Every structure is written in C-alpha cells, then in structure tokens.
Image: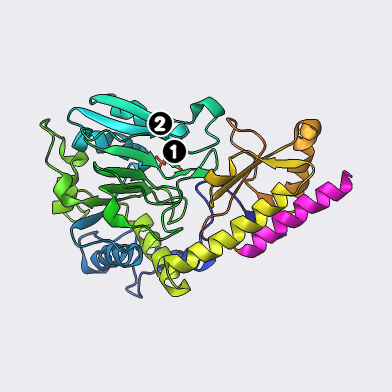
Amino acid sequence: MKKHNFSAGPSILPRTVIESTAEAVLDLNGIGLSVMEISHRGKDFQSVMDEAVSLFKELLGVPGDYEVLFMGGGASMQFCMVPYNMLQKKAAYLETGAWAKKAIKEAKYFGQVDIIGSSADKNFSYIPESYEIPADADYFHITTNNTIFGTEILEDIDSPVPLVADMSSDIFSRPVDVSKYGIIYGGAQKNLGPAGVAFVVIRKDILGRVERAIPSMLDYRIHIENGSMFNTPPCLPVYTVRETLKWIRDLGGVKRLQEINHGKAGMLYEVIDNSRIFAGTAEKKSRSVMNVCFVMKEEYKGLEADFLSFAQSLGMVGIKGHRSVGGFRASIYNALPVESVQALIDVIQEFEKAHM
Ligand SMILES: *Cc1c(COP(=O)(O)O)cnc(C)c1O
C-alpha cells in the first residue's frame, strides 16, 4: 500500500533526492568511491559543499554581506551558539512554543532574557502581536514556525535590533526577506535534508560584539573563516541538502513552493473547518502552512484512537499529534505531494460519513 508521510521530523524528502543520494552513497559522480569515504577537502566533496552554499544563497536571495554555514549539532546547538556569540547584556525572545522555550532556557546561561511576548496562556495556539522590541536588546529571537503547535509567523518582522530566527520547519517554504534578519538557522530534517546538519545564515557585521571568549567550535567566525570546514562537516547530509536545493530550483523556486504549500494547507484547513467532528487547534490568523494540528470536538473525543488506526490502515503515517496538543498533526512540508493531502482528506471524510 502507498504510504503518505506526514511525519513531523525527520520527515518526507523528494523521492528523486533520496534516489540520487543513494547513488552517491554507492558511487559519487562515477569516481568509483562513495561520498562517505572521500576527503571532505578533496575537490569532489568541495564542489558539493560549494554548490550547496551557492544554491542556498541563490534560492533564498541571501545578500552579499551574509554567509551560509552548514554544521552539526542541529537547531538545538544553535540555541546556545546564538547567545554565546551575540548576548552581551540582554536578549529579547518571543515565547511561542516548546522550541522557543528551549531556546530561551539556553540563552539564560549567558545573560538577561526578556520574554517580550508569549502565547503560553492559551497553550501556544496563537502568535502574540502586541509586544515591543526593546531597542537596547542585543538581538530579538523568534521561532517562525512552531512545529508542535501548528502556528507560524508568516511575514518578516521589522526589528530595531538583529532579528534571529529559528526556521527549522519552514525554511524554503516561502520567500524570505533575508535582509531583515541577523541570523536564520535551523535543523535540516524538516524541509531540507536528513538529520545531522544545521544551516546558519548570518550577517557578518553582527559578530564580534561580545566580550566573552568563545570556544572555536562554537564561534561563528571560525566556521566562516573555514568555509564550514573547521572540522569535518556532515558530508552525506550536506550532499542530500544540495540535492533538495536542486529539486527546489527545478520546481521553479521558493515562490512556486509557497503557492503549492498554500494550496495544500488551504485544502486541508477547509475540510477541518467544515467538519462536524474535527476542529483545528490554532487560531486562524496564526495557522501554520507546514503543520496542521487538529483534534476531535469534545463530544467525539472518544473516537480519536479509532480515527488514528483507521487512518494508519489506509497508509497515513505520522499523523498522531504531539502529546502537548493531543489529537492529530499533519506535517505537509515542501516534499509532501498534494495527492497525499487529498488522500488524508478522503480518509477524514470517509471516517465522518461512517460516524454520521
Ligand atoms: C525540530 C525543531 C528543532 C530541533 O531541531 P534539532 O535539529 O533536533 O536540534 C528546533 N526548532 C524547531 C522549530 C524545530 O521544528
């Protein structure tokens, strides 16, 4: 049976990307060696890294005074690397979910952290709007897509201080005005590649403002100086990221992906909004285009387990909601085809009919 992969992360990748990675694992460019067994400093891998960086810059529209880095440690290492490099006295954070809370916890090791807006009062079901960014903060940190709670900051914010964004789960889902950000970072394993590599887009002039000594591996400047090769980079994940970026390019770029993504999310939200037994959990104007969270209405709560096994029996994978929200979550990342969204809609509607 065909599987429809709604996993939250690691998550679906384009089939062609998986196939070309599999080929490179066996034999990179016909050189008779695997991408896993060659020097990262040799020309065969260097060109993979160079192309990954240049495609990333081209497709996201990264200005010339920014650098794109690939490194290990995931988005979670960036939770500490950002304040290590940037927090001298105080930083402002928007608390919009579990990942934002983790970022806040790490920043507190380095200095004062002001939570200037939070949606904790309503289980992170919305994006706070009335907050003021302090002009004396070293930076302002946001999580653009809250993977667990299904909310998203859909427009680029204007900030008087360097804006730092965790874009783990919506990178390359829409065009971004990179010039409004100081740092954009994330783990690759939602929209870009396999787990094991993180991306960092950074405006170079915001570095070097803190007084503390920074260990080499945690210092952005060291990674910039060494072109993401200060230590051995995650070669295989970087290879796959390059393949995904080529896939995005061949599809027509980020603007095209945004249209497709809006189409997919619109279809699914419409069905949930018009359902008798299901309801979305996020406020409409804050709803994520990437992670669609929904539950059963109070009077039908007892049917949640039935729906889950019904959906699983028809090939739906990864739709169980995170325990902090309950119900269901359909992650409909870039690589998820519209056919899979339609398949889920059919399952929802069939289940509804059976429970009239
Ligand atoms: C998945 C996720 C993370 C965690 O990424 P790791 O690479 O596992 O550290 C952080 N932030 C957001 C928004 C995520 O979706």
Quadrant including the N terminus: bottom right
From the viewer's perspective, tell me whether residue 309 is left or right of residue 254: right
Whether pointer 2 and pointer 1 mark residues with C-beta atoms closer than 8 Å, the reply is: yes
Q: Position of residue 219 (x, y in %)?
A: 18, 41
Q: Main secondary structure of the magenta part?
A: helix
Query: In this rendering, would 70 be left or right of 122?
Result: left
Q: Residue at x 35, y 26 (%)?
A: 105
Vertical placement of 288 versus 238: above or below? above
Q: In the image shown, does 248 or 182 lie closer to the viewer?
A: 182
Q: Position of residue 206 (x, y in %)?
A: 17, 45
Compared across the picture, whether 342 is left or right of 110 comes to right
Residue 171 at x, y = what percent?
Answer: 41, 54
Quadrant of ligand 1 in image: top left
Q: Position of residue 307 (x, y in %)?
A: 77, 42
Q: Give the residue pinned by disc 2.
A: 117
Q: Magenta stretch containing residue 349, yes or no?
A: yes
Residue 25, numbered label:
none
Q: Which residues are magenta?
A: 338-356
Q: Tell me which label, 2 or 1, sits earlier in the chain.
A: 2
